[in-house]
Amino acid sequence: MFDSVPKAAANAARFVDNEERNSSQQPHETLLRQAHGAASLYWLKAALAEIDYGVLLLDDDGRVVHANPVAHAETRSDHPLQLAGDRLRTRDVRDASVLHAAIEGASRRGLRKLISLRMATGELVSLSVVPLAGISEAGSGAAVDLHPRNAVLVMLGKRRVGGELAIESFARIHGLSSGETRVLLALNAGLQPTELACRHGVAIATVRTQIGSIRAKTGASSIRNLLRQLTTLPPLQGILHREAGCAPQGALAGARIARLPA
């Protein structure tokens, strides 16, 4: 009987000790989850800043929670979409219902949709609206929801084939001269050799010689094959800035990494 008293006291002491240990671990585990989320946000923003497509992330209320630098630049220009604070608008009122229906369909019903919006010139610009499902991660035997549900990804279509920075980097890798790089960019923009010669004030034979040199250096069998190489370049930007040691502007704005206790 008396032996059971110290045993009970010892068990109670172990119980209290375990409870204190668990309670002390909980804040640490919370900080770990917060740090993991902050680090993920940090790298996500850095990655999106390198992509040469406009990308916007909307929450389940349709508010823009993140837009990469290309999206900011596009929505400030003549693009059919405008970023008004944390809301996405259309310049043409006729497109408002199209955009709203696509975002609503993605957020509420999980529908993916490709839509086209009007520019002031009458040209159509495409963009995709994609639902992003909530992600749960297991921790300590329980699922912990780390991400908002019903988020929507809006990706703007490219209005040109191949980004200039990617093409300039391609030219540097293949050892093209500055004159050959200008010719390459012009060909990518759809200009014909005769138009190139007229624009640059040189003979057509000079342009043809430059094109021949570009093909030899890049291994392209024809102009068509050369342009195909350009269309398959990775959709990245900032390559030359990184080579020069410059960080992409706005890449990590607002991202913080939580400090953990030692």
Image (cartoon, helix red, strand yellow):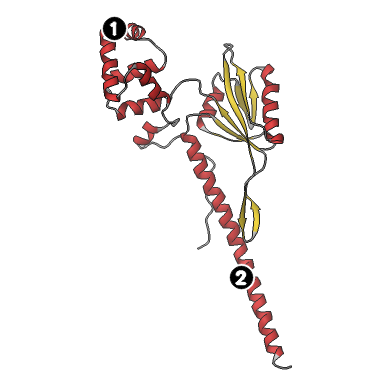
Q: Amino acid at mark 2?
A: Arg
Which is closer to the viewer, label 2 or label 1? 1
Residue 256 visible within the image: no
Separation of marks 2 and 1 at Cα, in angstroms: 81 Å
How would you rate the neighbour count of disc 2 (Cα within 10 Å): few for under 14, some for 14-19, many for 20 or more?
few
At horizontal 29% and vertical 27% (from top left) the residue drawn is 174
Using the rendered view, name the quadrant where residue 139 is placed: bottom right
At horizontal 26% and vertical 19% (from top left) the residue drawn is 213
Q: Secondary structure at mark 2?
A: helix
| In this rendering, position of residue 171 left or right of residue 114 | left
Q: Position of residue 253 (x, y in %)?
A: 52, 39
Q: Which mark is residue 21?
A: 2
Q: Which residue is mark 1?
A: 204
Q: Position of residue 224 (x, y in %)?
A: 38, 17
Image height of 207 relative to 168, above or below:
above
At horizontal 47% and vertical 20% (from top left) the residue drawn is 160
